[in-house]
Image (spheres, coloured by chain):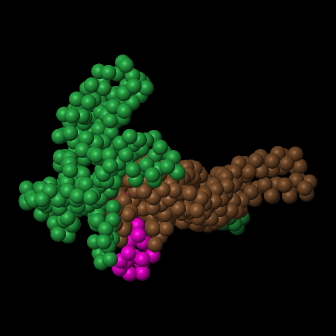
Amino acid sequence: MQQKSEDTFSRGSEEQHKYPGLSWHPALQLPTLFAHICVQESSGMLSHWVVLVLCCLGQLCADQSMKPQLAAPELATNNPTLTTVALEKPFCMFDSSLHPNKSYAIYLYVMKSSASTISSVVTDSSSKPLDSTFQQTHGGHLGPYKAASFDVPNCVSPPRLADAGDINKVSDVLKQYLFRVGDDGTCLYDPNFLDVCNPPLAPDTTYRFKYVLVDNTEGIVKDQTLWSDPIKTRKAKLPMKIDIWPGRRSGSMIVITSILSVSVFLLLAGLLASVFSALVESEDPSAETKGMSETTQQSELRPQLSSE
Amino acid sequence: MQHEARNKGELCWQVSWEGMAGIDPQGSRRTALAAEEHLSSQLLPYSDRKMCGIALTAECIFFVSDPHGLYPLLEATENNDIYAAAWIGIFVGFALLALSILGIVGVMKSSKTLLLVYIILMLITYAFEMASCITAATHRDFLTPNLFLKQMLERYMKSDTDNNNDKQMTEGVTKTWDNLMLQNQCCGVHGPLDWQEYTSAFRMTHNDADYPWPHNCCVMNTRSEPINLDGCKLGVPGFYNSNGCYDAISGPLNRQAWGVAWFGFAILCWTFCVLLGTMFYWSRIAY
């Protein structure tokens, strides 16, 4: 038990440096989900009374600073993508507002984070949640739109992220732990679609998200988180800008080319030299034989003359 | 001078015949043996070249047969000259084989015209093999990761092809990449984020929500289906292949380019010495 909380402590501090966009439980320096696991698990240990007190104080003070978070980066490595953002569901964020015998739902609102966003209010005058859609708000440009509606996530037994390695359990873990904004590419163009539409977001755009707790019977907003930190979707570059110039020539190519060129030159020079020397040699023997035949003729003539 | 430069082969036959006819048997036998040894030492370089020729042909046939199926990638980049170098290597290997036989015949007959023909044909073959080596070495330098990345993004699953040639190249690239990703358990050139960082022809027809990267990048079960599509789309470790395919591409291509270039270079170095020797020998043969 002690080792587990120590592990989460050390992991938390290095992660906070890696992911400054996430909001952290101010008292315990842990991600919100694990902060509340700490609360549950330390409740029985005498030596953790100080931690428990801090947890409770932190929970009371921190309700006003709850924000939607990106899903854990070890689990969802491709986040955010060009058109989707995977958010952690609001575990234990609304526990203080829940009554045991009522049914609640959580709504997710998405809004573009720009100076021209006209309003960021998610309730109307009678505290009912806004029923705006993606098309009505021009994709979150004019104001927030409702992207999802789901049950309150289970705070007592949250899904264990270690189970995500198991093929049989990964679907359930992903479904319970996170929600993917922009998942449904077809609901915008489907005239029969009646549910809440969650169409893909725009690339290279900053969005902000908010969770709202709604009472199902009365239909009014009971609690809401703050708007999340701005989260930007990816930007895609054009492939024709990729530079395919290979750069310097490799050393092997220079060696092969230079040595072979020199050798061809030497071979041609050798061929010319041997042809030339063969021609020169062929001239001399013909001169010698000519000279020899003349002297033999002369020597034959002289005995003839002398004999006569 | 004439006597020394006379055909050693003819001398050998003549002396051995005289020896058989009973004229000066001891002396003629000794000179015949000396002549035979000299002849066989001269013929050795030519038979070595026969082996080199056969080896070069065999190596280049192996490369041209494309055992890794990477030729469509090079054909689509219009940069397939290392295959041209291998084709030239096949024919140069045959030429070396044939010319070495011609060389042996020329040396045995000591015919000046035959040897001159041999030298000139060998020079032409030398030039072709030199072209093959330099082509293989030079075009190897063009095969960079960015080249394959750009081609993959522009051609993989491209739907609107302009003409038949474009369509053929696109199908070749798509099939090759699908096979590569399945067999080597890899994704993209540097990694799956190639599909996220750049727009592509694939992105035109497959939206990002359903296909952040092609489904061949997911870990597959025995029926070639992703074991968990949501895990693959989100990038959960263990459900998608996170390493790039560049090693699987560049390994075989490098081996081919360096094999053709350096083996050809070695053969040419050996041929250079033999050719110089042949020219020297030819210049010393009298008419």
Residue in front for this viewpoint, B198 or B52: B198
Q: In which quarter of the image is residue B230?
A: bottom left
Would residue A92 appear left or right of A260 to someone viewing this image?
left
Residue A1: tell me if it is visible: yes
Q: Which residue is drawn at 27% across and 58% down?
A: A216
Where is B278 relative to A165, above or below?
below
- Work out whether residue A129 or residue B199 is closer to the camera in this orientation and state it: A129
Residue that extends furthest to the bottom in the rendered view of this protein: B163
Residue at left offset 17%, top offset 40%? A64
- Counting from the top left corner in percent of width and height, residue A305 is at 67, 66
Q: Which residue lies furthest to the front in this view?
A: A101
Query: Image height check: is B53 above or below A231?
Result: below
The color chain B is rendered in = brown
Q: Is residue A34 left or right of residue A291?
A: left
**Which residue is depicted at the point 63% across and 59% down?**
B58
The quarter of the picture where residue B120 lies is bottom right
User: Looking at the picture, how far across and down is residue A232, in whole percent?
Assistant: 22, 52
Q: What stretch is highlighted in magenta?
A: B149-170
Instruction: Work out whether residue A93 can be spotted.
Output: no
**Quarter of the view holding residue B125:** bottom right
Q: Which x, y percent locates residue A95?
A: 28, 42
Specify whether residue A254 is painted magenta: no
Specify the quadrant that holds the C terminus of chain A.
bottom right
* B275, above or below A98, in the image: below
Q: Which chain is green?
A: A
Q: In this view, does B145 lie to the left or right of B65?
A: left
User: Is B156 situated above or below A255?
Assistant: below
Q: In which quarter of the image is the N terminus of chain A?
A: top left
The one of A93 and A2 positioned closer to us in this rendering? A93
Farthest-out residue, top: A47
